[in-house]
Image (cartoon, rainbow, N blue to C red):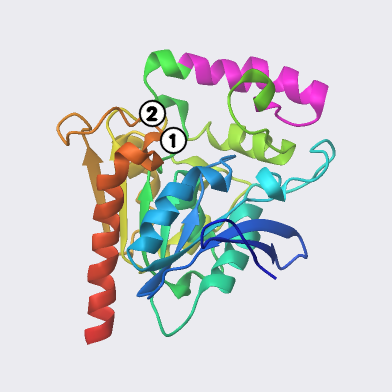
Amino acid sequence: MPTSHGDSSQRLALTAADGYSLGATLFPAEQPIGQILVGSATGVPRGFYRRFAEYAAARGYTTLTLDYRGVGESRPATLKGFEMDYLDWARLDLAAALEHLHQPELPTFMVGHSFGGHAFGLLPNHQHVSGLYTFGTGAGWHGWIPMAERLKVLTMWRVIGPLVTSSKGYLAWSKLGMGEDLPLGVYRQWKRWCRYPRYFFEDPSMPGLEEQFAQITTPIIALNATDDLWASPASRDAFMSAYRQADYRGLTLIPAEAGLPPIGHMGYFRPSAQPLWQDALNWFDQLAQSRRTA
């Protein structure tokens, strides 16, 4: 049963297909015209997306945010010894959230952040989604990253990460002041995929992913800021090209020209980025209108 916060949002306990319990929050719209599922970035707890979810609900979109297993309220008592596949976040966790949210009489959309744009192509029930708008999605290859930041990333993968994970049994990012801790499986797969210019599509141990992504025909917009060091427009293009049958458009944002403060990789969901949210919801409005008149 959902429990309410002081406002109208509702905390939920969802159950993935493998029985894992997940923390989620539903932001109901008073007179809904659609639903939105938020696909979080790697290791980012759902509370980070609260302001966007409230904004979307006020615009008529009942919105669901989710903590992936191992993160936030979906974290076990200890991450040491916790086994999972990075792609479980899409194939099991987001899939369960989408199944819970989707109401066939209204269109369902997805807003992604970084990994959220990867996850869409992995959803077994992606056909429920009428449109994906993703921010800061790209291939994680260090070659797409500017040199100064690249050196930091390589130091993390090659020096700090191995030391911390061998000691703790997971990537204790919180001890380094870098964000949420990550399960060992996520760290290992993320590190491996970042060796390839097109990310996991080039991992020989992951056959068939590109063919899976090629089946998707859903409308997609991917927006990347030019100051996003982790997901530049070139990095975006390298990854999003896998959605080759989709009605796809890539947008490049120069924050200063748009009258916005620096965006980086996390600024897409800070309050100052509200004009970007408005653009995404305006696009969903257009898709919803087309659905009604079809």
Horizontal and vertical percent position of residue 103: 48, 80
Q: Earlier in the sequence, mark 2 or mark 1?
A: 2
Q: At label 1, which amino acid type do we have?
A: Pro
Tell me what residue is drawn at x 31 percent, y 51 percent.
Answer: 277
169 to 280, vertically: above or below: above
Image marks 2 and 1: residues in contact by CB distance under 8 Å = yes
Distance (Cα) linking label 2 and label 1: 8 Å
Kindly report the secondary structure that dominates the magenta region of the rendered protein. Answer: helix
Tell me what residue is drawn at x 40 percent, y 80 percent.
Answer: 106
The quadrant in which the C terminus is found is: bottom left
Lateral position of residue 29 relative to residue 84, left or right? left
Which image quadrant for residue 93? bottom right
Tell me what residue is drawn at x 59 percent, y 72 percent.
Answer: 100
Horizontal and vertical percent position of residue 89: 62, 53
* Residue 206 painted magenta: no
Tell me what residue is drawn at x 80 percent, y 30 percent.
Answer: 169
- Residue that label 2 marks: 144
Residue at the outermost front position: 6
70 to 282, vertically: above or below: above
Count how many numbered circles sit on residues in the image. Answer: 2
Which image quadrant for residue 56? bottom left
Horizontal and vertical percent position of residue 14: 68, 65
- Foreground mark, 2 or 1? 2
Lateral position of residue 208 relative to residue 19, left or right? left
Which numbered tag is attached to residue 266? none
- Residue that label 1 marks: 197
> Where are the magenta residues, as a range?
151-173
* Residue 171 painted magenta: yes
